[in-house]
Structures are given as structure tokens and as C-alpha cells.
Image (spheres, rainbow, N blue to C red):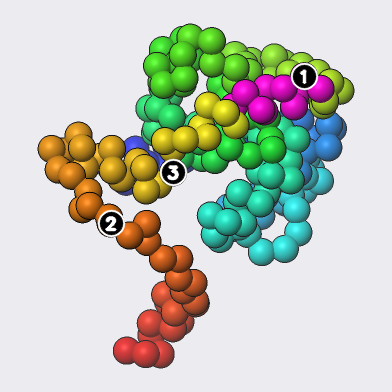
Amino acid sequence: EFFESQIHNILTNRRRVEVVERLSPHGLALFGGLSWQKLLTYSAPVLAALQPGPGVTTHAELRGIYNASKISINVPQAHVAQDAVQYRVIDVMASNALMITKHSPTSDLYRVFGEDCPIPTYNTLEELEQLCVYYLANEKERRAIVEQCNALVGEGFSFAERAVDLLRIAGLEASAGASKGQLRRVDLRLFSPDARSTSA
């Protein structure tokens, strides 16, 4: 299982590097952690695109990046079912960015959002590049699709709403008048290996 997991990671990383290399000339901004920094020594396009500073560590930071982007490209991980709609897809659809994703005729995007789901898709790197160039040059059309996507996920897709759906599927009901929860900030440094070793 470990070997299989590593092979999936290698395949995913190769696909993502190919996307970065193809789109780097078009003003691509790449946000990522240490795994991307390891590529700097042999990939000039990654070096040019990777944004300086610490990697993204919170969901709020990730959503901030989506909202500051014109286009967000979804390159699914090799080990994840290609037809699945992952949470980051919903986050991008709810943001100011236009999501472009790999095409799959049996994608759950069509089951969930209908056969006329407006998300642009690509089959090849050439198609992906053409879509990016087109929508970067046509803001009115880009914005119109973003607004359609925003409307599709405007209700029913929050984490709380998904939890209620899961309870319903399991034959359970959420408690009447249950709290929507309270946001609490946690210092993640408490969970670092250094903090654990000094507190042990």
C-alpha cells in the first residue's frame, strides 16, 4: 500500500509539474509547501511561478487565494476517483475564481449540478492552455461563469449542511435547535514534533 501510494503521488506530481510548465508564461501563480520547493533546482517554470513565503496552512488562507485568482485549475490526484467532487471544487465554485478541471464524461459534477454544468473542462494540456488564455482575455465571459458557479453552490454546500445530509443518510437526525458551532483558533505549533518532544 505504501509503494502504491508513492507511485500515485509521483504520477500526480508529474501531471501538476506539466501544467505549471505549460502555463508559466501566462502569469501563473503557484502556491504550495515544501514539496514544490524541492522542484526548484530542476524546473525553471516552477521557480518562476512559486510564490515566496510560507505555505498555505489554513482553509481560510486557501479560500483567500481562490478569491484573489482569476482562474483556479483543478488537477485531481491520481489516487482519487476522477469522477468525485472534492471539497476544494466547491470552494473554488464559491469563490471569485473560474475553475477549470480535467474532463470526465461521467463526472459527479454533472450528476450534482446537471448536464449543463458550466465549469470549463480540458482533455489535453493544449486545451487547458487555450481555455486559460481565452478566459484571461475575456473577463465578461469569465465573470458570467463564475456567477453561475456561485449560484450553484450558494445553498446546501456548507460543512454544517453536508453533516446534516450525512446524518440523514445514516438514518439519524440532527438535534433540534443544534448549535451551528463556534469557530475557535488553535495554535497549530502545539502539534509540531518539536512541541510534542519538549512537552513529553
**Residue range corresponding to the magenta coloring:** 140-149
Label 3 crowd (10 A; few <14 / some 14-19 / many >=20): few
Q: Nearer the viewer, residue 166 or 14?
A: 166
User: How many circles with numbers are drawn on the protein?
Assistant: 3
**Location of the N terminus (image quadrant):** top left
- Reading the image, the residue beneath label 3 is 158
Residue 62 makes an appearance in the image: yes
| Type of the residue with mark 2 | Ala
Q: In the rendered image, which residue does mark 2 sit on? A: 178
For mark 1, does the 10 Å Cα neighbourhood hold few (<14), some (14 to 19), or many (20 or more) residues? Answer: few
The residue at 81%/22% (across/down) is 140
Question: Whole-percent x and y of residue 13?
Answer: 56, 38
Query: Which circle marks residue 141 in the picture?
Result: 1
- Bin the neighbour count of mark 2 within 10 Å (Cα to Cα): few under 14, some 14-19, many 20 and up: few
> Relative to 2, is 122 on the left or the right?
right
Mark 3 or mark 1, which is nearer the start of the sequence? Answer: 1
Q: Position of residue 173 (x, y in %)?
A: 18, 44
Per the model, the C-alpha gap separating discs 2 and 3 is 15 Å
Q: Main secondary structure of the magenta part?
A: helix
How far, Cα to Cα, is label 1 from label 2?
41 Å
**Residue 18, how many percent across, how many down?**
66, 30
Q: Quadrant of the C terminus?
A: bottom left
Q: Secondary structure at mark 1?
A: helix
At a point 66% along the width and 28% down the height, the residue shown is 147
**Answer yes or no: do the residues labelled 1 and 3 have beta carbons within 8 Å?**
no
Residue at the image position 48 percent from the left and 9 percent from the top: 115
User: Is there a contact, CB below 8 Å, between mark 2 and mark 3?
Assistant: no
| Mark 2, secondary structure of its residue | loop
